[in-house]
Amino acid sequence: MSIAIVTGSAGLIGSEASRHFATQGLKVIGIDNDMRAEFFGPEASTAWQRSQLEKELGDNYEHLSADIRDDEVIDNLFKKYSSDIKLIVHTAAQPSHDWAARDPKKDFTVNANGTLNLLQACRESSPKACFIFTSTNKVYGDTPNRLPLEEKELRWEIDPSHEYNNGIKEDMSIDSCMHSLFGASKVAADILVQEYGKYFDMNTAAFRGGCLTGPNHSGTQLHGFLAYLMKCTMTGRPYTVFGYKGKQVRDNIHSYDLIQAFDHFYRNPRKGEVYNIGGSRFSHCSMMEAIQMCEEITGNKLEYTYADDNRMGDHIWYVSDVSKFQNHYPDWKLTKDVKTILSEIHGHNVERWEDEVVKS
């Protein structure tokens, strides 16, 4: 019996990974204690997704409501299944800049210590397994804000002659910048994943994601840009745009496309790799452009206010250059752009969010 361990299994990427690898013949053990509800409140709870996974996947899915910081639980799990564990997809995290500043110790222990626990358990009990970590573009801190940017009508854009015109590459420095405390804890985890691969000869990769999104995202104000924006547009809930005139640009990758990338790496793994992964130039937008698309799809006008102060360490323009991963895995392709993603989020959540519509 081949086992895949998926942390954060009821979250956006974890649930997509659980479904995918269960259909590929692996038994999935999902680790998720719904800490997202603790971070962001009841509306961000992933309990609904856990129920769907258990219903859909049946015996191919086993849920463990555990904390990845619990050494004993994690060690015992890996010892129990040992060499049967073929894959670890580690998505569990504290994912918010703002929240990390409120409780730096919890942020760091979840993101860094939790990752270390998993890596060491894997090394001791399942050293041949493939370890995939969802890192973040925030490891680059605010360095991207030093790029030569030009203000356009609805967006900021990079100087077309710059070497990063097609997106930011893995060679961007992570030093001498402000990361946010969240970014710092993810840097620690990211480096650990690389180090275990190179030092202990393990199959590991850190995927530095841009905006990861899709219809299963439990979006909230502090995390889940497109999902929360669509939710506000659909329900009439007020939205706040933070800084940069609402022209800040992000690339957005659908959870399906990300998991396909994970699958390619799993089938032909490498040691201590790092990849920038996102929607690239294929799927990117500014905040103002995303608002226009949400309004077009829903037929509603978004009620939003603008706050001059941007979030600390937030990017003005970030588009991923995914060419390194595509060179290593040329059969992988992006399939879903921003308009498609927003349409899916809308279609999948019409009924789920109908009780939250603000009455005029």
Image: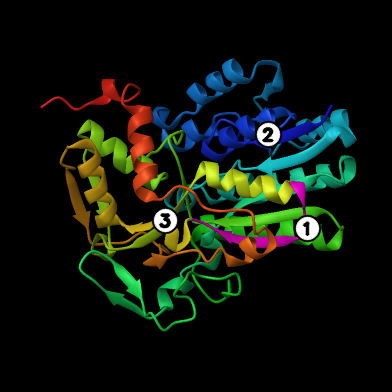
Residue 95 at what x, y percent from top left? 51, 47
Q: Which residue is mark 3?
A: 283
Counting residues from the N terminus, which is met first, the one under dot 1 or under dot 3? 1
| Picture residue at 27% right of the left edge, 63% below the top | 247
- SS under mark 2: helix
Comparing marks 1 and 3, which lies closer to the viewer?
Answer: 3
Q: Which residue is mark 1?
A: 270
Residue type at mark 3: give it.
Answer: Ser
| Farthest left residue in view | 360
- SS under mark 1: loop
Colour mode?
rainbow
22 with respect to 245 (left or right): right
Residue 46 at what x, y percent from top left? 50, 28
| Picture residue at 41% right of the left edge, 84% below the top | 161
Dot 3 surroundings within 10 Å: few (below 14), some, or many (20 or more)? many
Counting residues from the N terminus, which is met first, the one under dot 1 or under dot 2? 2
Q: CA distance from mark 2 to mark 3?
A: 25 Å
Q: CA distance from mark 1 to mark 3?
A: 27 Å
Q: Is residue 55 above or below residue 216?
A: above
Residue 330 at what x, y percent from top left? 65, 59
Give the magenta-colored segment's residue range.
267-278
In this view, the residue in front, 296 or 35, is: 296
The quarter of the rendered structure image containing the C terminus is top left
The part of the image, by quadrant, that contains residue 348 is top left
| Picture residue at 77% right of the left edge, 53% below the top | 269
